[in-house]
Structure formats: structure tokens, C-alpha cells
Image (cartoon, grey):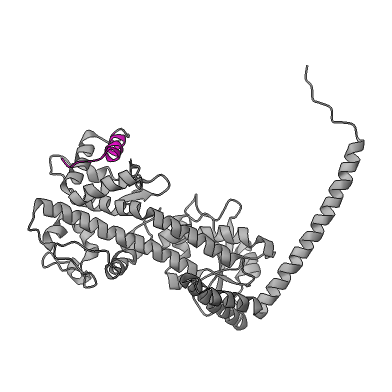
Amino acid sequence: MAERNVAALAILDDFSRQPGVSASVMANLRSILDQSPLLNRQFNQAARLGHLRGFAVLADPNAGGTFHPADKRIHLSVISLTTPGTDEFESGEPTFVLGHELQHAFNADAQARSSREFDRAIQGIAESPAPIHDYTGVLEMRLGDNRQDEAAAEIAGWNALVSAVKTRLPEATLEDVIEAARYRAEDFLDAAESARDADKTLAANLHLNADLTLTPTPQNLEAMGQNYFDKDPDDTNLGFRGNSDYANYYAAYAVGRIVALETHYSRHLGERASRIAIDMERLGLSERLLEENGLHLGSAIRRMPYLDLSHASTARRHFDHTYESHEYRPLAPHSDEALQHERETLHPMSPAEGAVVRDIAAYVDRMLQADATGDDATFREMTRALADLPAGRASTARAKADVDAQELLTVQRLREERRAQQTEDLAPPVAAKFLR
């Protein structure tokens, strides 16, 4: 049996006490750790460094395994750790999955930093005086970090599997690795070859080492981004309804953050209508899939209009809060609500308005590039240019007028409170309520 440190043993002991975890499940879990020296080392390291604090039973039927950054637990499928009948335990699938999820645990700190940077970028755009707040660039960067995380996890899963196969068969071939976890291996093979029973070949965009492992080089990470993260929803089957791809799965949370922070930080500008804009087509996003994954728009928001920049017409649409229902409910075309919504927010933009939006989007893209490269001079130049556009000057003027009006209302309120207090001082104290 492979050695495990105190922290790793405590994690296994805790998992063994959870409902639904049988002695045979624990025996199988320990066996996959013993059979893959690489996987066992990573498990020990993750436990010792605090990247992993426990295992839990997987409840999501649309996932093979999950890692939860909030409590640093990996949720494992008990079914994949169960030996069916008298058959031999198939360890390839759970070996790959555990290697994949452990990499997410190692990546969690970097992903948390990315999330904080995403929030700061949203705040910068939300506080901008520009009449249109284009979040396409910041969403693209955040989804890019998610893509990198998933690609690295896939490579880690492959290497854990190779370690197990080569422990059992030191002279193992690529075909031996594929046979150990055929379903997981499909993402690493040429599409034309993956449907055949023989002569499996590695995907042309991957570079395999002589020992059959994959190094997470930029080229291999990009390859697994293409082969895994970029797959169509029908091939990925993620999310609450099992119909989502990775982009829409991760973007559901990201879009919710945009709505919540846009609402919070832009409130002082006095804008009544949403100015959120996203190029949905460029990012591969679907309003239906986002809402079926569950959009959380904040505690007080049920619906948020936004501009879809995918087409020249720059269509006005809306997001609904669906975090509890996971239901996509577009407005009925001829309902009173739809007609009112059409009059207020869904009218198509004029060519002139569309030109303004695209002009602003170009400035915002340059701002994001400057921010990413640390080019402060260009960032300030683009900020001034945005504010100096006709729409920006008008928005600034409106914001100043709103602030002036708010200050006047505050003064009036203070005066009224002072007069009310003076009147209250003259009145008798309120009697205590007393019941015999």
C-alpha cells in the first residue's frame, strides 16, 4: 500500500463515515490511489498544503466529479467507485476523474485571483461615464481563465491514468492507456480515429512525451481547450439540465456578477435603464443556456435588459433571474408585458446608435488591453477619450445633474428631520405598553 500523510488519511477516514460510502467503495478508492503513484503523490500534497480538505458524495447526475472551492472538497461518484456484481473493478474512470479534480484543487488559488480581478474590471466599467458598458472583453478574459483551468485538469487526469497503467504494465502503449478509460480518452484522440476500434492516434494538436505523459505546455493547454472546453453542448451535457457546454456553464455565474456589480457601482450615475452590453455570439453564449444553468442577478433584481452586440442591429434583450427555477422564459410575443417591454427596452437601435456603440466598444477593448499589459498611459488616454465622446459628455452631464439633485434632496430631508425632531421634543414621551 502506498504511503499517505496524516492529512490524507484524515480525509479518507472522514469520507468513509459519510452516508452511502460502503467498505467496498473505500477499498476501491484506496486501490486507485495505490495503483497510480502520481495520483497518490498529488493527493498527499494537496492534503498537506490545504488545497484539499475532504471528499463528498457526488449528487449531480450530470457530472463525473466536482471540486467546490468554498469548502475545498472533491465530490466523487459512488457509482464509479462501486464494483458491479462479481465483475472486476474498473479503475480507469475514477483514476482520471480524481486526477482531474485534484488539479482543480491546486488551481483554486489562481482561479480565486482571477475572480477578484474580474470583479475589479467590472467595477471599472460600471463606474465609467460611457453610456454603454461593454463587458465582452472582461467576460472573454474570465472564460479564458476557466478554459485554462479545465485544460490543465484534463492533462492531469490523463497523466494520473498513464501512471496507473504503467505501474501495471511498464511497457504500456498508447492503446493500453486508451483502453483503461476509453470514454475519457476520446478527448485526446483525432476525431476521425476516435470512432474506430483500432489504430487509435493522438490528436494532431497534442504533443505526447516518450513516456506517454502530457506536459502542460501552452501548446498542449490550448489543444485541450479546443478538444475539451470548446466542445458543443450536445457533446458536453453539463449544467442543471445536462444541456450546456463549458462556456455557458461558467458564464452563468460571471453574467450574474456583471449584473449585480453593474447595478451596485453604476447606481450613483442616475441611469434608470441598463447599459450592459455583451457580444453573445463572439463568446459562444446563449441566453437560454445561461438561464437554464441558473442566473443569480442579485437579491432585488428579477429582470435585467442588455444589449446583444452580436449583430449589426445591436438587439436589446433581457436576462431573467433563474437561480431557483432554471427555466428560460422569454416574453410571449403578443403579451401585454412583451409589448410594454418592447416599447421601453427592446426597440432596435438606429444605425447611428449602433455606430456609437461600436465606437465605444473599440475604446473599451483598448482600455482592457492596456490594463492587461500595464500600459497606464494608454489606459488613461482611452478613459479620457471615452468621457470626451458626445455620449460620454452627455452621460457625465446627466450624472452631475443627478448628483446636484441628490444633494438638494439630502439638504431638504435634513431640514425636515430637524423640524420633526423639534416638534417631537415638545410632545409627551410615548407610554409603555403594559398588560395585566
Q: Nearer the viewer, residue 296 or 288?
A: 296
Residue 227 is drawn in which quadrant? bottom left
Query: From this viewpoint, which residue is outermost toward the right?
Result: 426
Q: From this viewpoint, is residue 425 visible?
A: yes
Q: Where does the image place residue 393, in percent across and percent down from the top left?
A: 69, 76
Q: From this viewpoint, is residue 82 visible?
A: no
**Chief secondary structure of the magenta span?**
helix
Which residue is located at x 86 percent, y 42 percent?
A: 421
**Residue 139 vertical position relative to residue 365 in the rendered view, above or below:** above
Which residue is located at x 36 percent, y 55 percent?
A: 107
Left/right placement of residue 60 relative to residue 344 reads: left
Q: Where does the image place residue 67, in percent across and percent down from the top left?
A: 35, 49
**Residue 148 vertical position relative to residue 360 in the rendered view, above or below:** above
Q: Nearer the viewer, residue 106 or 425?
A: 106
Residue 204 within the segment the image draws in magenta: no
**What span is in magenta?**
1-16
The quadrant of the picture occupied by the C terminus is: top right
Q: Where does the image place residue 118, in percent across and percent down from the top left?
A: 49, 62
Q: How many marks?
A: 0
Q: Where does the image place residue 194, in percent across and percent down from the top left?
A: 19, 66
Left/right placement of residue 18 relative to residue 115 reads: left
**Residue 273 vertical position relative to residue 43 in the rendered view, above or below:** below
**Residue 316 vertical position relative to residue 330 in the rendered view, above or below:** below
Query: From this viewpoint, which residue is outermost toward the top?
Result: 436
Residue 234 is drawn in which quadrant? bottom left
